[in-house]
Image (tube, grey):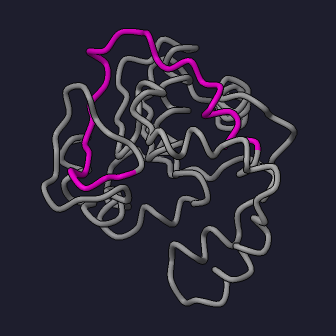
Amino acid sequence: MIYILPGMGANSNMYSGPWRKIADAKFINWPRYNGEKTISEVAESIIRRYGIMRSDSVAGSSLGGIVSLEIADKLGIRNVYLFGSAVSKSEINPLLRLLSPLSEITPIKLMQAIAGKFENEIFTMFNSSETEFIRAMCHAVSDWQGYNGEQSIIKRIHGEKDRVISCSGACKKIKDGGHLIAMTHATDCIEIIN
């Protein structure tokens, strides 16, 4: 089984169309927020909720990729697929890292209410996300130590125009892709899995 995690502020709906043709794939949503403060705690929650095992594979976009690395590290999983995600905190845009403490005072609920006024899949997903989860994960990513495990288990695809996360290591780069590579270039991402 391959478990595929969404990005922060998104849900499994970000993987539509051709994604749903992947055999033995489970597209998961973030579990209900239960006070998790670290990437490790979120990974443990997902492992418990979905029964992920060492023989499985994990994949994710952005935050979902970061959590996938933590799941793989905890269980000894041998296949991790990252779509516009990081293996090191240094790959995350420095401005975003600097702004993470402001998540405490950022009017996320207001931003969600405004986003909910637009008929756009990304805004709809963001509007339905748990505010406290978003706030907690802004801090968790800022505190994340990065992945120091076996690099050969990771397959990465990344948009060359991604301004949120850079890819400093080995990855397949998509020339006209941005941060939402899993949505805009689904077929390219699926090829890496296949």
Residue 97 is drawn in which quadrant?
A: top right
Q: Is residue 61 left or right of residue 157?
A: right
In the displayed structure, 47 sits above or below 137; it is above
How far from the left and from the top, in percent, is residue 187? 21, 59
How far from the left and from the top, in percent, is residue 47? 65, 29
Q: Nearer the viewer, residue 88 or 15?
A: 88
Residue extent of the magenta highlight: 136-163
Q: Nearer the viewer, residue 1 or 78?
A: 78
Q: Residue at x 65, y 25 (%)?
A: 143
Q: Residue at x 46, y 17 (%)?
A: 147
Position of the N terminus, as image quadrant, is top left
Q: Is residue 55 left or right of residue 161?
A: right
In the displayed structure, 126 sits above or below 182; it is below
Q: Nearer the viewer, residue 141 or 90?
A: 90
In the displayed structure, 25 sits above or below 155; it is below
Residue farthest left in this picture: 175
How far from the left and from the top, in percent, is residue 126? 63, 68
Q: Residue at x 39, y 43 (%)?
A: 165
Q: Residue at x 55, y 24 (%)?
A: 71
Residue farthest right in this picture: 35
Q: Quick check: is 97 in the magenta stretch?
A: no
Position of the C terminus, as image quadrant, is top left
